Amino acid sequence: MSMDCQRFLSIPILAVILLLGFVYYATVFIFINDWVGLQTSAGFLNALIFTSLVCLFLFSFSIAVLTDPGHVPSSFIPDVEDTVSSDQELQKTSSQVSQCDKCSAYKPPRTHHCKVCRRCVLRMDHHCLWINNCVGHWNYKAFFLLVLFGTTGSIYSTVMLISSGFHKDWDFGERVPLKIFYVCCGAMMVLLSLTLGTLLGWHVYLIIHNMTTIEYYEGIRAAWLARKSGQSYRHPFDVGVYKNITLVLGPNMLTWLCPTAEFTVCLLNFSIPKMQKSQKRSD
């Protein structure tokens, strides 16, 4: 077995796959079947839609697990500018040209050392146990899409459960185990939808600001220090909502929902603050 496939040999990943299998079986063969029947056109259409969401989730999940989140090339050498005139520019340059104490090597901007992976990860967002991998530059889109498809699928399954529950003619003297099953599944699906929906909303916020989870918390401290010194703070990689979205999902809207589609981001947008600084100087 290859090293990449061994990533799937993880208890959290197996738990995700088992949960997905249970939700799929219950949604298609119990909720949809009890509601309209799988032989009807409505039942077939709902089963097809939900199956498509599950396949898209599995595809995105596999890409997020197997894709290297991004490593720093061994030949990376920072581009240090000759002289910096102001203290503010000096501080910005020193923050971009940093060295990892653990790897004993230079690391580009937006790069952080992962204690679990024991290496520096480009544009690291966080280390996710559920994919047994870091979420970084090269698999962030796949991670975002798996959360998107997971949220959509959970809500869809919840709607099927509620529709089936209202459609059934409950006999209060019988079918107690079935009622318990429906109540437990309903509680689980609502909790899953809320959890994934909250995570989705969080990453939508990060994407439209071109920010990572680590940078968000670093920005809180930077904003506090800026206010303390009477200055205003703005995230240096924020280039506008639409541009921020395309830097993650890609320039072509038709491929936004494809986790393997190419997207045009120069190495972690390292040049964005530098371009802004050069443009300011030329003005």
Image (spheres, rainbow, N blue to C red):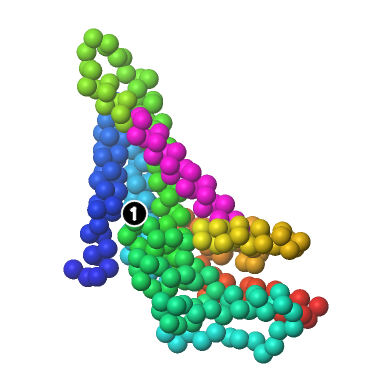
Which span is picked out in magenta? 186-209
Observer-nearest of 39 and 242: 242
| x 28%, y 43%: residue | 19
* For residue 96, above or below residue 24: below
Q: Is residue 192 above or below residue 112?
A: above
The structure residue drawn at horizontal position 56% and vertical position 80%, both measured from the top left corner, is 97
Q: Nearer the viewer, residue 35 or 148?
A: 148
The residue identified by callout 1 is 130
Query: Around disc 1, counting alpha carbons within 10 Å, would you say few (fewer than 14), some (14 to 19), or many (20 or more)?
Result: some
Of residues 153 and 99, which is closer to you in this image? 99
Given the current orientation, which residue lies at the most extreme bottom position? 82
Determine the secondary structure under disc 1: loop
Above or below, comparing residue 197 to residue 183 in the picture:
below
Decide: is 88 above or below 233.
Answer: below
Q: Residue at x 65, y 67 (%)?
A: 236
Amino acid type, label 1: Trp
Q: Position of residue 62 (x, y in %)?
A: 33, 59
- Res. 245 visible in picture: no
Q: Is residue 175 left or right of residue 262?
A: left
